[in-house]
Amino acid sequence: MQMQQTAKLEMAARFINSTNSHLFVTGKADTGKTTFLRKLATENRIEGRIPGDIPCSWH
């Protein structure tokens, strides 16, 4: 699924990557919540912020 990058998604990604706080992601069905989180986790794993030995269910 292709995800459209929006200002809100960019702000959420910056918050997650720059704080040590939790973010509760909510929204209606089929709005891209899981896609956003998978993309964020993949990018963080590639950049070394998530160790490679932490299992991911989508790999």
Image (spheres, grey):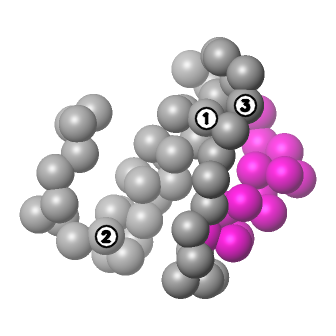
Asked if residue 56 lies left or right of residue 36, the reply is left
Q: Is residue 20 magenta?
A: no
Q: Which residue is painted at 58% across and 77% down in the image?
A: 21
Is residue 17 shown above or below 37? below
User: Which residue in the protein does label 1 denote?
Assistant: 33
Asked if residue 51 lies left or right of residue 53, the reply is right
Question: Considering only order in the chain, which callout, 2 or 3, is on the residue closer to the N terminus?
Answer: 3
Is residue 5 shown above or below 7? above
Q: Is residue 15 magenta?
A: yes
Q: Nearer the viewer, residue 26 or 5?
A: 26
Q: Which residue is painted at 84% across and 45% down in the image?
A: 6
Q: Residue 24 appears at what percent x and percent y?
A: 62, 53
Q: Which residue is outermost to the left? A: 53
Q: CA distance from mark 3 to mark 1?
A: 7 Å
Q: Is residue 3 visible?
A: no
Question: Considering only order in the chain, which callout, 1 or 3, is on the residue closer to the N terminus?
Answer: 3
User: Which residue in the protein does label 3 denote?
Assistant: 27
Tell me the quarter of the picture where residue 51 sits.
Answer: bottom left
Q: Residues within 10 Å of mark 1 (few under 14, many from 20)?
A: some
Q: In the rendered structure, which amino acid carries the disc numbered 2?
A: Ile
Instruction: Identify the secondary structure beneath mark 1.
Output: helix
Asked if residue 30 lies left or right of residue 37, the reply is right
Q: In the rendered structure, which amino acid carries the disc numbered 1?
A: Lys
Q: State the extent of the magenta-drawn residues as a range.
A: 3-16
Q: Residue 8 appears at what percent x and percent y?
A: 84, 52
User: Which residue in the protein does label 2 denote?
Assistant: 50
Magenta-highlighted stretch: main secondary structure? Answer: helix
Q: Residue 45 appears at what percent x and percent y?
A: 33, 63
Q: CA distance from mark 1 to mark 2?
A: 19 Å
Q: CA distance from mark 3 to mark 2?
A: 25 Å
